[in-house]
Amino acid sequence: MSPHEPHHTYDAVIVGGGHNGLVAAAYLARAGRSVLVLERLDHTGGAAVSTRPFAGVDARLSRYSYLVSLLPEKIVRDLGLRFRVQGRTISSYTPVERDGRATGLLVGGGEERTRDAFARLTGGECEYAAWRRFYGMTGEVARRVFPTLTEPLPSRDELRRRVDDDEAWRVLFEEPIGVAVEERFADDLVRGVVLTDALIGTFADAHDPSLKQNRCFLYHVIGGGTGAWDVPVGGMGALTDALAAAARDAGAVIATGHEAVHIATDGRTAEVTYRTADGEGVASARHVLVNAAPRELALLTGDTPTGSVEGAQLKVNMLLTRLPRLRDTAVDPREAFAGTFHIAEGYRQLAAAHTQAAAGELPTAPPSEIYCHSLTDPSILGPDLVERGYQTLTLFGLHTPARLFERDNDAVREELLKATLAQLDAHLAEPLADCLALDADGRPCIEARTPLDLERDLGLPGGNIFHRDLSWPYADESTGRWGVETAHANILLCGAGAVRGGGVSGVPGHNAAMAVLEAGQA
């Protein structure tokens, strides 16, 4: 497509070629609709991409999003995707020093090992029994709620009946998650491990009355109907490459280097003005699906943006020549880093970090979590690197809202990275710096991204990985049948900002496509 070609009309124009936009494109094209995808960047995938970030190094990393939980098998099956995930036998490891002794909590590797790990840390059976009861409850909620994500939105009452557990409903949907954590667990470290799922990309206290931490927690524990977070084989780009291929094979036109700049609609037809390196063009459509944040949609249509958009995370990618040794010699680093390695994420530490960040200060002990993709899936590394024992590390930092970086993004990024790695080093028997690989120019293989970097690189307002605060997975007065509807009858959200959006799921893309197909049958 070029701006010099005749005016084009499609059944659907999709703004944004991230994974949700590609899901919508594939579904609509397979249903016989003519589809155009407009992508601002020179490649598809959005935040779900794999890149080689280090010069001259054959390591293809999931640069932004990196684990998969919320992607329904239904979407993979419906679209015939050549994509799979690999489970992790270790769920998490959390190091801590107690009574001058390096120890920690390893969750996974079988029930007996996990029970022994709890006893080793806490000196008894109570915390493990509480853990089993709590996650037994969330597991049952997951089995009942997850299948609803690709159905028309249930009402609040309908979802409550589906959950069919008054205690679970109260814990997850009605009172701050901090109440349940404090009632059920006594150990500070165990409390922190539970709470972390409520804080991924979400700047909130455990007792925030808005319950946005509960919404974050809910989406993290219902994924796949199990709550398990799996490794995308081949890296996250393997998913979006498969989606782009599925959309193209079905007949969708994908135009990269095409930035949508304006959407005009009368409710029945719409025109999308786009910009390329050569000028401007216009595409018409019966429906426009926007795979961008609601704030960006408002700017495209001339509406007034509303709602909070501030992101709160630090993303760090690393390549190591070897995994570092741990001070806790009872745990093999290959197990500790295979799951989620929690750093400075005790319950009191998380509260202190939030208090400091809310006051406009960088946390003195920045909380974060790490995992090693290459232990589960070495295919992202070149054969030579695999043979030499190289490994990747992915770090995700919490309680780092965008406001902290506004005074000097580059300087604050470096300050925060240094403080974050110091927290990790405190639990290592050798400095992480000694394990970092070097690129072709002799520079350490490490890169960090702040919320402001994500806003610049990916167009995420405020660097918010969810596009806005997560929503409850049920209907209210502001939602439509599928949770993708907007103030304009023929413009739909198909990105993370839709109801039941957030994470790498494809759910908003699926639901927007279903809404279009239903409208065509009306």
Image (cartoon, helix red, strand yellow):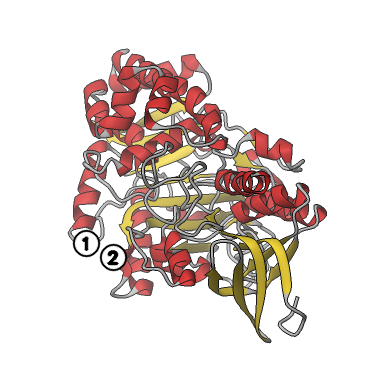
Image vertical order of residue 408 relative to residue 482, above or below: below
Q: Amino acid at mark 1?
A: Glu
Within the image, what quadrant is residue 208 found in? top left
Q: Is residue 476 visible?
A: yes
Q: What is the C-alpha distance between the residues marked 2 and 1?
A: 7 Å
Mark 1 closeness class: few <14, some 14–19, many ≥20 residues within 10 Å: some
Which residue is located at x 65 percent, y 51 percent?
24
Q: Horizontal and vertical percent for residue 471?
A: 39, 44
Q: Which type of secondary structure does the marked residue at label 1 adopt?
A: loop
Lower position in the chain sequence, tag 2 or tag 1:
1
- Left or right of 307? Residue 39 is right
Task: Check disc 2 and report the residue beneath it.
Answer: 404
Of residues 133 and 297, which is closer to you in this image?
297
Q: Quadrant of the N terminus?
A: bottom right
Within the image, what quadrant is residue 185 found in? top left
Q: Horizontal and vertical percent for residue 520?
A: 67, 48
Q: Is residue 108 visible?
A: no
Of residues 78 and 93, which is closer to you in this image?
78
Q: Which type of secondary structure does the marked residue at label 2 adopt?
A: helix
Q: Amino acid at mark 2?
A: Leu
Which residue is located at x 48 percent, y 31 percent?
222
Q: Quadrant of the C terminus?
A: top right
Is the residue under label 1 in contact with that under label 2 (CB below 8 Å)?
yes
Task: Check disc 1 and report the residue beneath it.
Answer: 361
Q: Horizontal and vertical percent for residue 12?
A: 67, 59
Which residue is located at x 70 percent, y 47 percent?
27
Mark 2 closeness class: few <14, some 14–19, many ≥20 residues within 10 Å: many
Which residue is located at x 67 percent, y 72 percent?
283
- Tell me the tag on residue 482: none
